[in-house]
Image: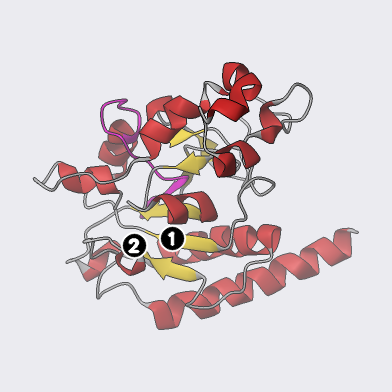
Amino acid sequence: MTEAAEETKGHKRTDGDRRIGRRALLIGGAAAAVGTAVLARDELGHLWWRLPSVEKPRKEGEVDFRGAQWVAASAANWRRADRPDDYRIDRVIIHVTQGGYRSAVKVFQDPGHGAATHYIVRKDGHIAQMIRELDVAFQAGNREYNERSVGIEHEGFVEEASSFTDAMYEASARLTARICARYDIPVDREHIIGHVEVPGTDHTDPGQYWDWDRYIPLVRKARAAAERADAAGA
């Protein structure tokens, strides 16, 4: 689950991305004031794409995974970027919503929530995309990991094994396989991780009932199938 989802249970949110995101919006005026250190040097290095005609083209409602439904998260819950050109993507982070699909969508559309993931996978295998992979989702409670990862929520509860259905595993595996292929991410447990494994987090998802021994082979199988399909269509 996302950092802000835990805040609703009485935990303090620690993700500082929203502050950075607002500051990034000053790039137009700040570019002429580099010498005054209005923006840190490393941040300017990640904002070059904001110059006219440099940013990748975007279309309203466009999705990165074919078959996903576009359901936009609140703009307050993510930061505009131009990944992987400004931030390399080398991780997929697996989350569990600790609630139903509809409630997860609702909170990610709430500007006061402060967090969201790129995707939500429903129990029946339906996939919603809420944030473009180009952009940084406030999902991990760790700025560096937010910038380098794509986050996937899964409907259900960490304490209920029945949350994780066959349809969910298969749909999620196909999604993760495509993400890994797109950014040349190795399909292994070093690069496909649970939220619990993000440094500095106090989260437990996806929990003991998430079957990694089943999931990683499914992702590998899906990636191989996708590569064969791409080769046949070339």
Amino acid at the residue labelled 1: Ile
- Measured as percent of width and height from the top left, residue 213 is found at 42, 83
Considering depth in this image, is 211 or 53 the residue closer to the camera?
Answer: 53
Residue found at x 67% / y 59%: 183
Considering depth in this image, is 47 or 89 the residue closer to the camera?
Answer: 47
Q: Is residue 72 in view?
A: no
Position of 173 relative to 186 (above/below): above
- Measured as percent of width and height from the top left, residue 19 is found at 37, 32
Label 2 sits on residue: 195
* Count of picture labels: 2
Considering depth in this image, is 41 or 80 the residue closer to the camera?
Answer: 41
Quarter occupied by the C terminus: bottom right
Q: What secondary structure is found at the residue carrying circle 2?
A: helix
Q: Residue furthest right?
A: 234
Q: Which portion, as a residue range, is magenta?
A: 108-124
Residue 51: in magenta span: no
Alpha-carbon neighbours of circle 2 within 10 Å: few (<14), some, or many (≥20)?
A: many
Residue found at x 30% / y 57%: 96
What label does residue 184 carry, if any?
A: none
Q: What secondary structure is found at the residue carrying circle 1?
A: strand
Position of 40 relative to 84 (above/below): above
Residue found at x 52% / y 32%: 39
Q: Is residue 205 in view?
A: yes
Q: CA distance from mark 1 to mark 2?
A: 6 Å
- Measured as percent of width and height from the top left, residue 232 is found at 87, 65
Residue 109: in magenta span: yes
- Is 89 situated left or right of 1 in this image? right
Alpha-carbon neighbours of circle 1 within 10 Å: few (<14), some, or many (≥20)?
A: many
Label 1 sits on residue: 93
Position of 19 relative to 218 (above/below): above
- Is 21 situated left or right of 27 in this image? left
Labels 1 & 2 near each other (Cβ < 8 A) = yes
